[in-house]
Image: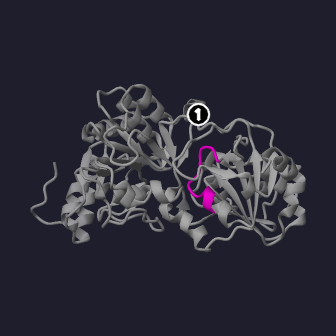
């Protein structure tokens, strides 16, 4: 095949390519910062011509123009596998719906035909000499989306870093139906989250648990970033990386010499991930870097794959934990915040790992809209809250007041352990609630 000739044959003006979308179609956008604002803008221009078009995405970092062009949802119905900040705001306006997902299962939904996209709109790097377009920083289930889609339309963007695999990090021109050359807008920059003093206290407790040769997973948020910053400044050695999300702090740890991956059992000396979000520091680091390997999420987040590495430390945030040990990380009551993501995968996988620990981290309190101090460790979850990690799967819980292990503990032992890491001013009230719930015994001790 003459790839250059084939490229020119498939090269299409964006508005022409978007005419392939019909009313009633399922249109699959890309994932994370690999969502194409250029293709979305062209679809938005067809708003009055289309009806009942379902759009699916994964953590789109911007509010799509197609959604904003249709505030009554007469033409486009928008759905997200994991809410970004932009999706959350749209959800609050009844313009976005969440699709429940245990992250490592995502590819199978497309392989089994549970999701059958009519059109896939995917942003990629320029074609290489072998006829391949690199998917860039996100392939959690992008390859399976393209396999399942009836029509694949790609936007070529010169700013996309070449992210090496791994597996299935590229798509061949023979698998593409239409090629659109975009406006080469730079990669989305993830704003740096402020790290509070409490985040630093929690991170310090987590750091005490991590050993030389540990294999790291960091979730989204300021606290995991605080852990990464502290590790970069520590004397830990030979850390490995097997994570769903790669962020800037991994670059800091690598450049400080903390990450070598030489003690990993799988993908030795490789930083394994399924998507990356950060700043140009991260994207420049990833570009053509053979120390990194991007894989679909059915590999990175499979608990049994995770567990084959020793000393896996999964470090994630939560919104609240009840006295039974149930973790709510994706909604605050009925208000949807994010999604299950990979938290459940890594809490499970860390337990299968020899010497592993799955850590759910949260500040002990928050201040409500009336200025009242409220405990994030609560008797029962806020009504409507979604359980992200069941009590039977939960492993460790960490606040600025300490760490509590959940495995093999009865209900009263869990209550005791969790109240011991709650805010001291709120412990007496939690004890009263635990007594009413019949999960407290006289021998319980509070430190």
Frontmost residue, 362 versus 419: 362
Relative to 13, 179 lies left or right: left
**Which residue was labeled with disc 1?**
279
- Would residue 80 be visible to someone looking at this image? no
Where is residue 429? Give x, y as percent.
27, 57
Residue 92, image x and y in percent?
A: 64, 58
Question: Residue at 35% across / 63% down in the picture?
Answer: 326
**Residue at 43% across / 62% down in the picture?**
388
Q: Position of residue 80 (x, y in %)?
A: 62, 60
Frontmost residue, 216 versus 379: 216
Residue 266 placement, left or right of 249: left
Q: Which region is colored magenta? A: 135-144
Q: Residue at x 27, y 43 (%)?
A: 401
Is residue 141 in the magenta section?
A: yes
Q: Residues within 10 Å of mark 1 (few under 14, many from 20)?
A: some
Q: Is residue 248 above or below residue 88?
A: above
43 or 195, which is in the foreground? Answer: 43
Answer above or below: position of 191 versus 355: above
Name the residue nearer the viewer: 136 or 218.
136
Q: Residue furthest left?
A: 443
State which quadrant residue 377 falls in: bottom left
Residue appearing at x 62%, y 57% in the figure: 143
- Can residue 140 be seen in this snapshot? yes
Q: Is residue 392 left or right of residue 245?
A: left
- Magenta stretch encompasses residue 426: no
Relative to 4, is 326 above or below?
below
Give the color scheme: rainbow, by chain, secondary structure or one colour.
one colour
State the SS at label 1: loop
Q: Residue furthest front?
A: 1
**Percent of width and height locating residue 152:** 75, 59
Count of numbered marks = 1
Side of 72 relative to 93 (left or right): right
């Amino acid at each position: 095949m003459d790839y250059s000739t084939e490229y020119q044959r498939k090269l299409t003006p964006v508005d022409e390519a978007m005419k392939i979308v019909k009313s009633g179609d399922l249109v699959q956008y890309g994932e994370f910062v690999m969502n194409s604002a250029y293709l979305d803008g062209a679809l938005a221009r067809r708003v009055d011509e289309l009806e009942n078009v379902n759009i699916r995405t994964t953590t789109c970092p911007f509010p799509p123009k197609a959604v904003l062009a249709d505030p009554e949802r007469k033409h486009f119905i928008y759905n997200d596998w994991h809410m970004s900040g932009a999706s959350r705001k749209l959800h609050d306006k009844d313009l976005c719906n969440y699709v429940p997902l245990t992250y490592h299962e995502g590819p199978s939904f497309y392989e089994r035909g549970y999701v059958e996209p009519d059109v896939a709109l995917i942003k990629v790097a320029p074609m290489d000499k072998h006829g391949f377009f690199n998917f860039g920083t996100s392939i959690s289930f992008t390859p399976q989306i393209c396999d399942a889609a009836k029509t694949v339309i790609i936007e070529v963007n010169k700013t996309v870093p070449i992210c090496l695999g791994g597996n299935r990090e590229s798509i061949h021109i023979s698998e593409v139906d239409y090629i659109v050359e975009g406006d080469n807008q730079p990669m989305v920059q993830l704003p740096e989250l402020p790290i509070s003093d409490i985040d630093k206290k929690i991170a310090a407790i987590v750091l005490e648990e991590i050993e030389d040769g540990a294999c790291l997973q960091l979730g989204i948020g300021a606290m995991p970033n605080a852990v990464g910053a502290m590790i970069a400044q520590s004397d830990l050695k030979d850390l490995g990386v097997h994570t769903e999300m790669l962020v800037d702090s991994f670059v800091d740890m690598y450049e400080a010499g903390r990450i070598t991956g030489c003690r990993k059992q799988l993908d030795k000396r490789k930083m394994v991930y399924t998507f990356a979000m950060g700043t140009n520091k991260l994207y420049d680091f990833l570009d053509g870097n053979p120390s990194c390997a991007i894989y679909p999420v059915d590999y990175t987040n499979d608990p049994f794959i995770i567990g084959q590495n020793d000393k896996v430390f999964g470090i994630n945030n939560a919104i609240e934990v009840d006295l039974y040990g149930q973790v709510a990380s994706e909604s605050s009551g009925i208000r949807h915040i994010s999604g299950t993501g990979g938290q459940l995968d890594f809490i499970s996988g860390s337990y299968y790992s020899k010497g592993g620990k799955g850590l759910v981290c949260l500040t002990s309190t928050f201040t409500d809209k009336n200025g009242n101090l409220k405990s994030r460790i609560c008797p029962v979850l806020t009504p409507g809250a979604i359980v992200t990690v069941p009590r039977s799967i939960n492993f460790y819980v960490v606040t600025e007041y300490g760490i509590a292990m959940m495995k093999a503990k009865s209900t009263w032992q869990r209550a005791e352990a969790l109240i011991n890491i709650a805010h001291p001013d709120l412990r007496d009230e939690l004890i009263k609630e635990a007594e009413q719930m019949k999960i407290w015994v006289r021998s319980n001790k509070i430190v």
